[in-house]
Image: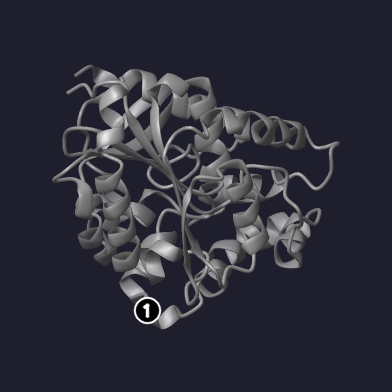
Amino acid sequence: MNAATSRISSPSPTASEPWRSLYPFESRWLETGGQRYHFVDEGRGIPLLFVHGNPTWSFLWRNLIRDFRDQFRTVAVDHIGCGLSDKPLEYDYSLTQHSANLVQLIDHLDLRNITLVVHDWGGPIGTWAALQRPERIARLVFLNTGTFPPPYIPWRIRVCRLPVVGQWAVQRHNLFARAAQWMALHNRQLVTSQALAGLIAPYDSWQHRVAIHRFVMDIPASPRHRTWQQLLQLEQQLPSLSDRPALCVWGMRDWCFRPDCLQKLIDIFPRARVHRLPQAGHWVTEEAPDRVRLIMNTFLTQTDLAQTNRLEPHG
């Protein structure tokens, strides 16, 4: 193992916080563009690659990592600016760059026969990376995400995009991440205070929230935005992966990625297995972790034989 992925202890400011017991994983980093890109790499075998969105981090996947690391190699990233990765003030916080970082990690770890598991912004980031390395992708799992230009932008997100006021609210007062703890959940009482603290733990200062704001600003409201064309291209090219087994698990009480987003994904992946969870919101892995685990386990088990004709896993 080279220096870029040597095992390094987690930053001391968070090491003793209560939420750490929910995230008992060894931290690893890859240096990319002068920044430390944090990831978790637990278990052995066929890889499950977990890609988070905004304003979460790899903590979102903690239950699935624990559930599957005895059967699979579980890899979960923190995008630059998120989680335990570096959080530079000056950085290209774009879909293009986040996807390029993910491709670099896939190549560096030589991940093959990947089951890609994505949520929120992890959808376009992960699937754009998958299009760059299609020969490495075996299965896809979508949880409340979108891989196309947004059909709408909810007013609660539009407020955070307002000049000056939006940045002040997101970075000065952490309103986006804090509001998500209410708005991304249909039933907040299903999630412990310890877990809620862990979800926003890395976003404890103005600088540490820069990526949250930049993610919000990267949502394209019109074709004039640089990310619109990339999302349009993604939507057009993604059917090239539709021969892979795909699974959609959807919290139907999500006010952001509403049922029409799910339908657009079904149109792209018409053979996908679809599970609608009527009483879960956007953070479906938080409100229904056991249900998500069972659905994923069935999917992985039933599609296992289909993988034997694809790339053999390394490691």
Q: Nearer the viewer, residue 233 or 168?
A: 233
Could you tell me if residue 60 is visible in this image? Answer: yes
Q: Is 216 drawn above or below residue 257 in the view shown? A: above
Q: Check disc 1 and report the residue beneath it.
A: 190
Above or below: residue 68 compared with residue 314: below
* Figure quadrant of residue 284: bottom left
Which quarter of the image is occupied by the N terminus? top left
* Residue 34 in sight in this render: no
Q: Looking at this view, is 247 or 76 the one in front?
A: 247
Q: Quadrant of the C terminus?
A: top left
Q: Position of residue 95 (x, y in %)?
A: 61, 35
Q: Position of residue 186 (x, y in %)?
A: 51, 77
Count neighbours of disc 1 (C-alpha within 10 A) and say few if under 14, some if 14 to 19, many if 20 or more. Answer: few
Give the side of residue 141 with respect to residue 4, left or right: right
Q: Secondary structure at mark 1?
A: helix
- Disc 1 marks a residue whose amino acid type is Leu
Residue at image coords 60%, 66%: 175
Q: Picture coordinates of residue 120 (x, y %)?
A: 54, 51
